[in-house]
Image (cartoon, rainbow, N blue to C red):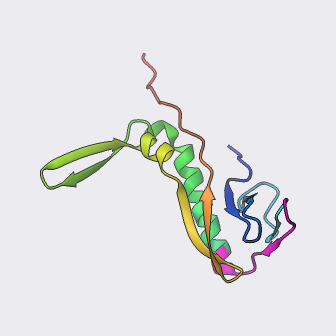
Amino acid sequence: MEMDHQLHFNCQRCESPIPFSVLGREGFTGSLCCQECGQKYTFKDDTLLRQLRQFEALCSQIHASEEILGSTSIAIDVGNHHVQVPFNILLTRLRSVIELEINGKKSTISFRVEPLKEYSPQKT
């Protein structure tokens, strides 16, 4: 499953979203340009690139695991109270983000996730 431009962050100059992928078929050159204002971003830090690749791969694997996650829950215990939150609710209500430093400033990089379809096992 190939999904392009899964990551994005807001331009530090104009706040427009800048979509990109470090795992895409076309390869990541390490340079991005804001389509709105022309601000350029260069990713030369090997640690930053490694973290971006790991984050995108993790988020992609979660998306690829839609079938199993449709029947999986996170259990939360607080005292005597027990709540199970289905993974598909978590994935559609919460954003996957990582905060990294870009050009010396903290930036939040988000992973775009399409809402997961409700999974119903095939009846045989």
User: Which quarter of the figure has residue 16?
Assistant: bottom right
Which quarter of the rendered picture does the C terminus lie within? Answer: top left
- Residue occupying image coordinates x 26% and y 51%: 76
In the rendered picture of this protein, how many numbered marks are placed on residues?
A: 0
Instruction: Give the answer, above or below, for where 110 lies relative to 43.
Output: above
Q: Residue furthest left?
A: 80
**Residue 25 within the segment the image draws in magenta:** no
**Residue furthest bottom in the image:** 104
Give the x, y percent position of residue 73: 34, 43
Work out whether residue 25 or residue 109 is closer to the camera in this orientation and state it. Answer: 109
Image coordinates of residue 113 in percent, x first then y, are: 59, 47
Q: Residue at x 80, y 61 (%)?
A: 27
Q: Residue at x 12, y 50 (%)?
A: 80
Q: Nearer the viewer, residue 58 or 92?
A: 92
Query: Which residue occupies the extreme top position in the image?
Result: 124
Magenta residues (range): 36-48
* Residue 68 appears left or right of 80: right
Q: Quadrant of the N terminus?
A: top right
Taking the image as shown, residue 68 lies to the left or right of residue 99, namely left
Whole-percent x, y for residue 102 in the image: 68, 77
Q: Which residue reaches farthest right?
A: 38
Q: Position of residue 52 (x, y in %)?
A: 63, 67
| Left or right side of 84 for 36 | right
Determine which quarter of the picture holds residue 105.
bottom right
Looking at the image, is 85 positioned above or below residue 98? Answer: above
Which residue occupies the foreground of this view, 5 or 16? 16
Rendering quarter of residue 37: bottom right
